[in-house]
Image: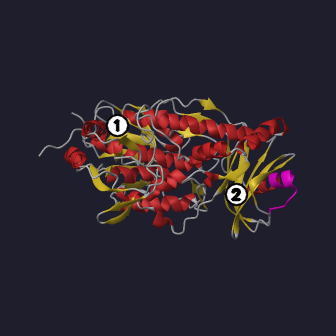
Amino acid sequence: MARKLDTDVIVVGGGPTGLMLAGELRLGGADVIVAEALEQPTGQSRALGFTTRALESFEQRGLVPRFGTVETMPMGHFGGIPFDYTVLEDANFGARGIPQSQSEAVLEAWAGELGADIRRGRELIALEQDEDGVTVTVTTPDGTREELRAQYVVGADGAHSAVRKAADIDFPGTSGTQVMHLADVAGSGVRPRPFGERLPLGLVQVFPGGDIDRVIMTEYDAPVDNHDETPEYAEVAEAWLRVTGEDISAGKPLWVSSFTDATRQAAEYRKGRVLLAGDAAHIHLPVGGQGMSAGVQDAVNLGWKLAATVRGRAPEGLLDTYHGERHPVGRRLLANTRAQAMSIFGGDESQGLRDLYAELIALDEVKRHLAGMVSHVDIRYDIDPEGHPLVGRRLPARTLDTANGPVATPELLHPALGVLLDLSDSAELRYAAAGHKDRVTTVTGTLPADGAFDKVPALLVRPDGYIAWVGDDAAGLTAALDRWFGAPDHA
């Protein structure tokens, strides 16, 4: 006799990816337990922002006001070569100055309000899956063991993922070749260097933050094999002195860490009833705020699909589209960060590459391409490559003019339902969508004539904000609805 389920989904890991996924699952009607090893949030700043697309994802769930004042940066870089990301419409270098601790606090509160069961002090020690579910064994704060069972388990437990290892999922890639130290320091007394300064012995960056500066440095000849992820501040200050000649030892460190340019990607994001997201699925040089942002987008892609699956409403193969869509995105992410690492870390031997980047980035077409890549706004899922150019791309924020007044398109996605934008006042299309009204919201109106949506009669948008269908024929809409949302309800 199969053991009773404790929940629909267990998410292992309570960082930004796991918490975002927990909220997405609850919006989709799935019960979820988040098992986080830490008994209390670290409060560490870690990532200091996120990409344009991650910001859009938060906006589509109504979360942006919870972050307070959010400022985006127009100027960014690729491989250390600065340029203006706003050369591409809707793009920027992302939100900056938002510590990861704040992002986690926002997401934990949101997921908890939606009914996610967040259990801290639970460290995974065993995982076993069978045809009917997955059983995990975790330690508890009082030192005992607890068994939990769910239909599915998602590993969002970071680069050293215990879930990935327990599920025996390969994690191929390359080991690190350079170590970067970073610290948030009060009273460092050093001048800003947001795009970095290349010196004979290493590379340094300083991001000013009022009374607290983030200092980042790599010493070209530092050994990688004894890399410590939590070095002492004195060690960082000594290395900074060797590379720059500046003494920051009198500064007060609030947080110290280090990382390498190791680059790896899980061979499969799904193995039976076990799935991976965030750093558990891909690690890379954290450049451009892409790391946490990619994890958030993994969660938004997976959440509605997994919720529909556990509720028995998913069409055939829906859950497999998670790997099919996000694995190529992760592979491209690793390629762009690896290319940037060669430019950033390379010494004199990489000067030709930097010169080439600078020459290419002077071209507007190249700027637009790189801005779209790093901001993640140019993602196009392989939904219908031969179809309309908008299919597979995200729905940008626009104001829809409706009979009831203007509506911002992100607001329509707050409930994490699909959205049919009827832009031609078609009774036929509205009738075709009626059988999916519990999963798809239909809104009639018009969008601004800004070129992007000219002559577009209707759009079907998935809960993750990506366009699944464009057209004016009821048969095509019906096929798309059935493909992404399952069979209709018939009264």
Q: In this figure, which residue is indicated by the disc labeled 2?
A: 183
- Taking the image as drawn, is residue 224 in sight? no
**Looking at the rendering, in which quadrant would you find the N terminus?**
top left
Residues 348 and 465: in front is: 465
For the point 80% across and 63% down, the residue is: 190
For the point 29% across and 43% down, the residue is: 308
Compared to residue 433, the image places residue 410 above or below, namely below
Q: In this figure, which residue is indicated by the disc labeled 1?
A: 134
Q: Neighbour class for label 2 at 10 Å: few (<14), some, many (≥20)?
A: many
Compared to residue 189, the image places residue 159 above or below, namely above
Q: Where is residue 126 in the image (x, y as percent from the top left)?
A: 43, 38
For the point 80% across and 42% down, the residue is: 220
Amino acid type indicated by mark 2: Ala
Q: For this view, does 329 lie left or right of residue 253?
A: left
* Image colouring: secondary structure
Residues 437 and 311: in front is: 437
Q: Neighbour class for label 1 at 10 Å: few (<14), some, many (≥20)?
A: many
Could you say whether the residue bearing mark 2 is in a helix, strand or loop? Answer: strand
Q: For this view, does 70 lie left or right of residue 57?
A: right
Q: For this view, does 307 lie left or right of residue 433?
A: right
Residues 34 and 218: in front is: 218
Amino acid type indicated by mark 1: Val
How much space separates mark 2 and mark 1, taking CA atoms?
A: 39 Å
Compared to residue 130, the image places residue 314 above or below, namely below
For the point 53% across and 49% down, the residue is: 293
Q: Which mark is residue 384?
A: none
Q: Position of residue 348 (x, y in %)?
A: 85, 38
Q: What stretch is highlighted in magenta?
A: 239-249
- Taking the image as drawn, is residue 163 in sight? yes
- As for residue 268 lying within the magenta part, the answer is no
